[in-house]
Image (cartoon, rainbow, N blue to C red):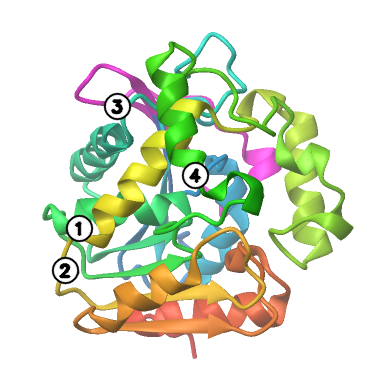
Amino acid sequence: MEQAPFFTEIAEGPEGGQAFWAHAEDGLRLRLAHWPVSSADRRGEGTVFIAPGRSGYIERYGHLAKRLGEAGLGTFVIDWRGHGLSDRLTDDPKICHVERFTDYQHDLDAMIQAARDLDLPRPWTLIGNSMGAAIALRGLVQGIELKACAFVGPMWGITLPPPIRSIAGVLSKGARLSGFGKRFAPGQSGQPYVTKAPFEENTMTGNAEEYAYWQSQAKAHPELMIGGVSFGWLNESLKECRALASMPSPAIPCLAFCGEDDGDVDKEAIRTRMADWPNGNYVLIPKGRHDLLSEKPEIREAVIHQILNLSGNITP
């Protein structure tokens, strides 16, 4: 596979990471990266696929990859279409847009095929973060094979401000039909969240060091960043959440985590899904915000510990 740019100096992940180009079925070029288990670690017991959240990119998961490496696990991450260094979908590269939410399945399929081509160590497990959890859920329903999965702040329902909650679907659909699908939805702009929201006001994490880590990445490589969502992305996401709600849960061991203070996703949609998930459990994390994988050390470690236990990779 052809190597792709990889900013290891800002990722701060394990040694030996490499990025690659892959192509989705519909022709879009995607960036993927693999952090193997280093030779200094005592074992290699599989690979964790990371399905990033909206506005996520490979380098943002360097710290998580290092923690997984300590448990003997390699990490495999993707830049979704329109994210990171994967092909952007609008003339303005800062707009988060997708034509159909199901197009992300092409990316997930390409990720699975790349893992096969690279012969990544098995078993394979997956951590789906926010939007990535919605993408991964459909993939699991459609039959991708994994040993286990964990979802963090899964976007199976979106929390919207009260003024637009009741009209979001109609408004976004109307904008698409009027030819404005690739324009920013109301209240959205091209400025990345971490450069706009000061730490004290952010909804993602209570960990000042992790937030500064993201901000330093945005400053060093602004080309990795995206801003707000388009009318098209909003409309497709609302439709996908409704579609997912009607799908049965796959029979695979699963944990779904949500922060008590997470105001970005619909907690009731997560509770409802996990109540009917065979071998599944819902875990509400006290004082946690949206990105639990980047929360304060005591919160983050509690979540990772449970994920490793699910995967059978607890570090003594």
The residue at the far bottom in this view is: 316
Indicate the secondary structure of the residue bearing disc 4: loop
Residue 79 in view (yes/no) = no
Q: The residue under label 1 is which amino acid type?
A: Leu
Distance CA(mark 2)–CA(mark 1):
7 Å
Q: Residue at x 81, y 38 (%)?
A: 196
Q: Are marks 2 and 1 in contact (CB under 8 Å)?
A: yes
Q: The residue under label 3 is which amino acid type?
A: Met
Q: Residue at x 71, y 76 (%)?
A: 297
Q: Are marks 1 and 4 in contact (CB under 8 Å)?
A: no
Distance CA(mark 3)–CA(mark 2):
32 Å
Q: Earlier in the sequence, mark 1 or mark 4?
A: 4
Q: The residue under label 4 is which amino acid type?
A: Gly
User: Which circle, 1 or 3, is nearer the viewer?
Assistant: 1
Q: Residue at x 65, y 63 (%)?
A: 294
Q: Which residue is mark 1?
A: 140
Residue 4 place in picture, x, y as percent: 46, 25
Range drawn in magenta? 1-30
Distance CA(mark 3)–CA(mark 4):
14 Å
* Of 93 and 46, the residue lying toward us: 93
